[in-house]
Image (cartoon, rainbow, N blue to C red):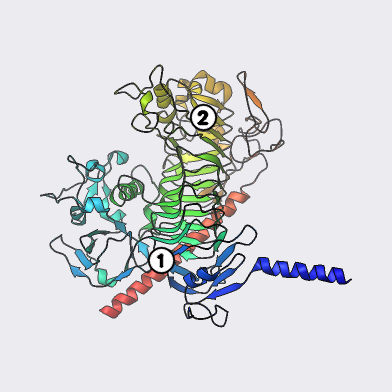
Amino acid sequence: MRKAGAAFLCVVVLAGALRGAELYVSPSGNDGNPGSPAAPFATIGRAASLANPGDTVKIGPGLYREQLTFTRSGKKDSPITFAGTRGKKGEFLTVIEPPGETLLRWTPAPEVGPEVWKTPLARRPDLVLMDGFMIAYINRFTMELPRWKKLPTELDEEMLWSKYGPKCGRLPGFDLLSLPAGIRQKHQYFGARREPFWETIGFVLSGWHKGALYVRFADGGNPREHRFFASSGSGFTLKDVSHLRFRDLHMRGSRSQFRLTGNSSHNTVERCLLMHGGSRVLIERPAEYTTVEGCILTAGFIRGDVFRLRKPDDMRGGMIYLVFKYITGVSTSDDMGVNDKGGHTRIVGNVFLQGLIGIEAFGTDEEVSGNVVREMASVGICTGARTTGKFHDNLVMNCGIPLRIHDVRHKRAKREEYHYRNLYVQAPREGSQMWVHCTSHQYGDDVINFEPGTKKYKKNPPNPVDAGKFYIYHNTFWGGSERDTFMTQLPVLYLSRRFRMAMPFFAVNNFLKDHCNWRQSQQELFAGNVLYAFSDTSRMERKDPGVLGFNRALTREETRRVWKQGGLPGLPDLSLAPGSPALETGIDISRPFTVNGKTYPALPGFAPGYFKGKAPAAGALQKGESMARFTAMHRRAEAAVGMLNELKKRSAGKAKEKGDREK
């Protein structure tokens, strides 16, 4: 009996050790306090400097202006946890911003142009916020260009993306700030359209030069009626630390809200609201085993309704893309939810809203699953030259390009991607579906293999780069432009001709729009897919006979009977209707399978018996399977939109109060 009691006591003591201590932080606290509930610390930094493995830092409601580099690690079974506070409705009550600088000393700057204002700011910031939301911010190289003698009356492509150098045709930053209020942009993306410049970015643009920040209000606004904040650097930096866990925090106002670098490993960011910056979570090589789970990530731009690519006659989303790539960025995409170049990263169950790129998955052995990615002006999910991993059960909606496979044949690195059970939803005739990118004839390890002055591989390339393998199966691609959708002629036919070989794509059991001139011979495998028709099907006649031999092409009438009717606003019900012509059209990929005399290995993600009937159905959903999981994801995203709208209303209200007080 005594031994049992001793054993019980030992278990209790061990459990207490694993749980660790609780340290408390409050804006009303004092760093000289012991960090107890009755006498909390004032800063997260003080608690972080004392926390040991197994400890939990409980951060109370309020605003904390801190930027931290964490130096203490937890352990595998006893991480150090930093936990914020949530309200009864799930609202984020713990808000963390960088110290930054609030800008108050505004004066007119007529030497630049009408409606331009300036304020002293000693150092160039990384980020500028107005009323708690990002505004367009001109990169430093463009701000340093000498002014033109005459302002243009219309913007063209070269004025935004011309390369720097002796023949640079890029419009200088000060001239951008001085553009007429009604000026429009022409671009190959827009066709015959001319898109409004100032309206798209909310009529406000900023730039820094030689000790001053400049702001232009093209609608005659006054910066004294708003709250301006400038900051630099990352919010939380994790360098060479492990087993840290962050949850329920509202992080905003930094260039990166979380930056993981060095030999950091096994760190987790969960259930956080992350806004602003160039990369809300930045994971740099060789950091590994990072988990980003259950978070809401958004650009938090002042004009959040213009990110998605729209109808062909309304390309304001395309305009936003140009702003973030060529004005804010330096000919590179300058806004990402998660920018991952690490290893073994898990990006799971998050909501990505309104930005340029949702997930840039350039790491190795990644898992990207269960995420909602919406309203990205550029790309929903983007993979790169070293990507390996699995991408599944994601809901990607209303992005310029839902899935972009980037840098094919650029690097000598193993590349293997599995994309399955994803739902890609575009509005009819809006945006693309999937795009494959390759410029290995210009740069990268593959450039030596091209015939000089051409985009074609040499007949006997000296050292060819392995393109990798891309498995795309059981996905539903719904909607999108009539011009380009999943694997159009450019990525497949064009690249196949360039490399003089079939491209290493294995496309099986997908729902695809039927308007491309498909070629069976251009890919390693194209079988079991259902090609549906939103419009005419006359182009079917031009297909490679092999396509119709191994895939099913539907007429318009058959397409109407594929899916159930109804659904939620913005999300159609894409479960299969009884008697759907897509039933039993696929190939069982849960075991080795043979197509046209060639046998392929089983593909991951599907256990034997995953379908009902003689054969599986094409698409992300099987016979009898409902939209429940995708519907739940969509509703969570809608709730996040509502939360962000409330934040914007409160910020606007506070800004109005400030303006009224100063009048």
As rendered, which of 148 and 464 lies closer to the eye?
Answer: 464
- In the picture, measured across the screen, residue 268 lies left or right of residue 452, that is right
> Which residue is depicted at the point 30% across and 22% down?
452
SS for callout 2: strand
- In the picture, measured across the screen, residue 543 lies left or right of residue 604, that is left
Callout 2 amino acid: Phe
Residue 651, image x, y percentages: 39, 69
Residue 355, image x, y percentages: 41, 52
> Seen from this angle, which residue lies furthest bottom?
38
As rendered, which of 522 and 533 lies closer to the eye?
Answer: 522
Instruction: Count the labels in the image.
Output: 2
> Seen from this angle, which residue lies furthest left?
149
Q: Say above or below: 575 vs 93.
A: above
Q: Say above or below: 164 vs 125.
A: above
Crowding at mark 2 (Cα within 10 Å: few <14, some 14-19, many 20+): many
Residue 258, image x, y percentages: 46, 58
Quadrant, the N terminus: bottom right
- Residue 648 is marked as 1
Whether label 1 touches label 2, CB < 8 Å: no
- Residue 505 is marked as 2
Question: Would residue 86 be visible to someone looking at this image?
Answer: no
The image quadrant of residue 617 is top right
Q: Nearer the viewer, mark 1 or mark 2?
A: 2
